[in-house]
Image: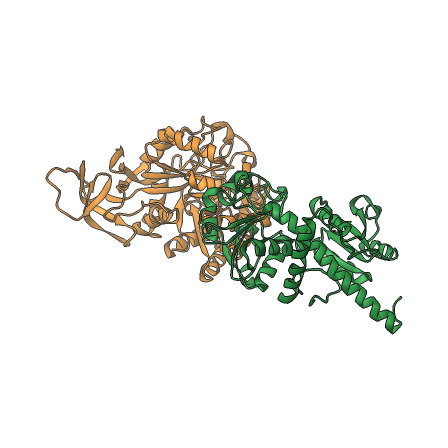
Amino acid sequence: MTFRARHLLGIEPLSPPEITSILDLADSYVDLNRRTIKHSDALSGMTQINMFFENSTRTQSSFELAGKRLGADVMNMSMQTSSVKKGETLIDTALTLNAMRPDLLVVRHPSSGAVNLLAEKVNCAVLNAGDGRHEHPTQALLDALTIRRAKDRLHRLTVAICGDIAHSRVARSNLILLGKMENRIRLVGPATLMPAGAAEFGCEIYEDMREGLKDADVVMMLRLQKERMDGGFIPSEREYYHRWGLDADKLAHAKPDAIVMHPGPMNRGVEIDGTIADDINRSVIQDQVEMGVAVRMAAMDLLARNLRAERGRALAEGTYV
Amino acid sequence: MILHFDNARLIDPETGTDGPGSLTVQDGFIAARDADAPSDATVIDCNGRCLAPGIVDWGVKVGEPGERHKESYTSAGRAAAAGGVTTMIVRPDTAPPIDNPESLDFVAKRALDSIVRVRHMASLTKSREGREMVEMAFLCDAGAVAFTDGVRVVPDAKLFGRCMTYARGLGALIVGHPQEPNLSRGAAATKGKFASLYGIADVSPVAELMGLERDLALVAMSGGRYHADQITTAGALPALRRARAGGLDVTAGISIHHLTLNEFDVGGYRTFFRFTPPLRAEDDRLAMVQAVADGEIDVIASFHTPQDEESKRLPFAEAAPGAVGLQTLLPAALRLYHQGGLTLPQLFRAMSLNPARRLGLDGGRLAVDAPADLVLFDADAPFVLDRFTLLSKSKNTPFDGARMQGRVLGTWVGGERVFG
């Protein structure tokens, strides 16, 4: 195994072989998850704490299920109703939890960089489940696994990422990962939702959706947050749908076998037409959810191996506290 | 139907020429210049009078919807035709404003009442409140030629920048009102001796420069297309020059009133001389005439703003700003010609050619294949203006009782005679 990191904070520090090794292991967990008895002891006896400072249903349950299937003791902390409300700082919260000796911390936070800050203060493995508009590494990994299984490769594909790129950690992690794996990446969306300097990321920028989707192998739609629809970034839902909503007409510009992805939850009729989302020949949206559990199992398994190895070395050196 | 304008003095802003010639019009378009009259043509002997491309008046207020008692498309169209205006570029600051494709569709249908051409600008933000951008793509599809909140500045620079960024992808033109809104709030006159003497709330001319500098910085940031509706102070010109030298897609206009009147014309608190922005010092007026001659100011327009009598019969600072101008734009502009400040081709470059070009319209030219939108006028004929002879429903003109020169003899839209 080539994955040696202590934490999984983003895609940025990962090398292509590390990405491949996570995906390879995830493949085996897909098989496990399809059995009736879905159990492994990879995290047996270890404690996993899910700290979500931002609302989440699907990601949190995916991480919870992943931990449980690997035999970990999983605790969910809904941080919005906890000590943070009483005025505790992020670092104090982290130190308090650290004193309870967890092995894996899964953290989502609305501020970019918050998870990195927390990782500096604890001596367990930290998984970034999304920080602000920075990174969401397990989403990019599950998307990569979905693409790899649908297209039988993860390189030299034309991937169009469409919608609110500027505010999307999903887009950021995906374009880093897909870039590392040598794909052609197009960013498609209104100029008001395109991050500054996007062209310097090595992506092609399109405002016209039809041009952007031309001959794409993968069409990755992003969720448009409700608060962006109020006229500050785009004039209205209906104009957004008219120009950037994925419908059959726009999708016809992509390759005939192009797959359609969406990280969920979808706004049907805003960024994607319902019939496209439900088209089993094009949409891999349900596969993405399935791959999510497997990828998170793989990531936590690998982090747990590294943690055990590190602690073993520390014990041998007599530095383990 | 073939028309042949014989023995005319052709004012051609495209070539910058002013000289004798003839023009042949067929099927609504200019078919030939300086050709012999076709045998089946109706010949119009111009007797050496001026024949110029019809005026494209950028920034006309029509009171539909909401203030039809002040001006309707019918009355505005008649006034325009009598003033040599062949295309009215109508403002969206109606009640309610034109801020969605449905209301644009409504006014486009109402505009069929006008005997001259009408194109519409749409507002830039919903309800002109400066908070949410309008559906620019739908409005472009519905025929909006530009987006503006009129004299209301969008105070939120972030939003204004985003509007420009969004407009860039559509190639849409944004028309700004360069003014620092906090500095000019409540002002009815330009800071200076006159305002101090009369005790009128005033604003420094620098408010215009500040507003322009902000807008230009956002243009540079977003790469959008921008037109400043009115640049009226000399202090703002260097900023405009710099922006153009820097390659920004920027143009500027001015109202005919700021080119022909100054702050002292307000005299004894005459509310027909209340404008937004207020009338400026004479030095500024002269500098702006020069700027038009130099091509630094692209567009001269009437900013036709009909107000009923009650809106003007108020203390100066409380009176509604603006004046009607469709019928007086040409004679007022001819003052600048008679005073020697501008040539006729320069005037029609600013009144016809430039606004048409900037808005992507085909008019404003005397070239073969251009639409036959024409005005025939006697540049010298003197008259004293009686405001009650104006065809607008509203009679609020600052030129009431003024001695003017220049009478429109005929106006043609697409080869159809609409006046004279």
Q: Is residue A100 left or right of residue B53?
A: right
State which quadrant residue B72 falls in: top left
Which residue is nearer to you in this view: A82 or A249? A249
Quadrant in which the N terminus of chain A appears: bottom right
Q: Which chain is green?
A: A
Q: What residue do we see at 48% from left, 54% from top?
A: A216
Which residue is nearer to you in this view: A68 or B167? A68
Q: What residue do we see at 89% from left, 72% from top?
A: A318
Q: Please say whether residue B339 is visible from this viewpoint.
A: no
Q: Which chain is orange?
A: B
Q: Is residue B209 left or right of residue A124?
A: left
Residue found farthest to the bottom: A317
Residue found farthest to the left: B39
Vertical side of A72 occupied by A180: above or below: below
State which quadrant residue A181 falls in: bottom right
Which residue is nearer to you in this view: B411 or A305? A305
Q: Position of residue B92 (x, y in %)?
A: 47, 37
Quadrant in which the C terminus of chain A appears: bottom right
Q: Position of residue B312 (x, y in %)?
A: 50, 31
